[in-house]
Amino acid sequence: MTAAPHTSSAGARGSIPRYWDSLDFEALWREFPPAPEYFDGVYKASRDELQALQEKRFLAQVERGWQIPFYQKHWGKAGIRRGDIRSLEQLRDLPPFSVHDLRDALAHNPPWGDLSGLDPLTDAPLPLVLQTSGGTTGLPRPMLYSPRDREVMNIITGRRLAMQGVRPFDLVQVVLSTGLSNGGFLAREGIWKYSGAVPVMTGSGAQTPSRRQIEIMRAWKTNVLVGFSAYLRKLALVARDEMGIDPRTLGVKSLIAHLGLEDRAALEELWGAPVYDTFGANEFGSIASDCEHRSGMHVFEDAFVAEVIDIDTGEQVHEAGQRGVMYLTTLFKHVAPMIRFNTNDITSWVGGAPCPCGSCHRRISKLFGRADNMVKLRGTNLFPEAVGALVAEHAATNGEFVCVVAKDSQGREEMTVMFELSAPADEAVRTQVEAELALRIKEALGVKLILEAAAAGELDPLTGLSSTSKIRRLIDRR
């Protein structure tokens, strides 16, 4: 049974749409069980059971897609007609779309676009919320969420928090931006509604300076941190190097981060607590998460169909460890279903033995970077995240970096890697570290780059580390 929105108090023109009356919550919770019920049910479902559930929900999403102008045009251009897609096996027959198609769709009728399938001024009114992408290039990308869409995203957030050790009445300090971008507010909703813990919304460093973040943590005894790994590392260094406080004495029991290629062990050493990786996106919410065993991030397969696609061939990747871009299809969204969306995030499947937690949900290893951040430099494909991982290996750096691509006076493309030193250093030391990193990157990636040392904190205006959740690692000046 599908828990459809109902609009008893909102159905009459002129009435006020009310969130509480727009959903049958009990039916929704049966369809998408929150924690802890989730762990005794669909979390332990067999592959056959999961695929049967995905089949049913996928076909419902395709039917919804045919009601939306964006998909009518997008699928029609590919020669797809209504009724052609009759099974999940045919998912690969549908053309993918990307952020560029999303921007075009939004331009037709901002901020609703033609992907929402809903005109709130003429359709049966629902209470809606608008959140956006990080907006690192151009205007932030808005997305509308209905109560059903948002509540399923909150349920999944609660599930992953339980998987990552959050328990009722924990104080969870969220150091993600709270504004137009989705991450901070979605974390707050999921923590508050579906974990029993208490969200402490200090926000990014622009909203609460890093020293104040540490002071609040110490005074209020917050015991879980949620944020991007680079800023979690910065907070530890501010506590240790600027305030004389060992971060391991602050009582943090777990850190929940978007790790990417960050060194999990180094971050755990700084805080003296386990780090849990997670993967999410503005249009989807939480997509995959570590469990207590941290053997790869489990995809929430009752809510998403995930594909890993070879960048060069466009074919699905099934072999464990082989990297590709992730395509995602939602199995729950009503206002703006996302069907074969190319996230541009590079990942791979985890193989080997099943996870000891007992779940059969497929796992992804980590995020290796973004395909739209890839730079082709003298025949070599470079990802800024891979460069940053090598920078972070060096003991003289604090892990902060940004890659700048530009043309020199002869028109030759060059990449300069600016990185921060962990301590003040004279010119001789700076030159030595630059040379050592240049050699290490040449050995590992096969290309010679220009290295440029900076003092701790000097790159903040370029990366946005203290002011935004979407940290900038590539500046293209070509």
Image (spheres, grey):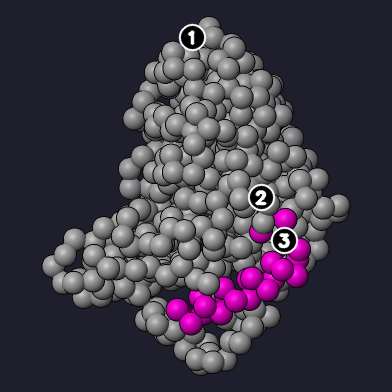
Label 3, label 1: how many angstroms apart (C-alpha)? 49 Å
* Residue drawn at x 35%, y 75% as measured from the top left: 117
Q: Residues within 10 Å of mark 3 (few under 14, many from 20)?
A: some
Looking at the picture, tell me which residue is in the foreground, 412 or 455. Answer: 455
**Toward which corner of the image does residue 150 lie, by quadrant?**
bottom left
Tag of residue 39: 2
Q: Main secondary structure of the magenta part?
A: helix
Residue 110 pos. (x, y %): 27, 66
Residue furthest to the top in view is 244
Looking at the picture, tell me which residue is in the foreground, 212 or 254. Answer: 254
- Taking the image as drawn, is residue 213 in sight? yes
Instruction: Identify the amino acid type marked 1.
Output: Met
Q: Earlier in the sequence, mark 3 or mark 1?
A: 3
Instruction: Identify the amino acid type marked 3.
Output: Ala
Looking at the picture, tell me which residue is in the foreground, 287 or 475. Answer: 287
**Toward which corner of the image does residue 326 lie, by quadrant?**
bottom right
Residue furthest to the right in view is 353
The residue at which mark 3 appears reads as: 45
Tag of residue 387: none
Is 151 magenta? The answer is no
Residue 357 pos. (x, y %): 76, 46
Q: Which residues are magenta?
A: 42-65
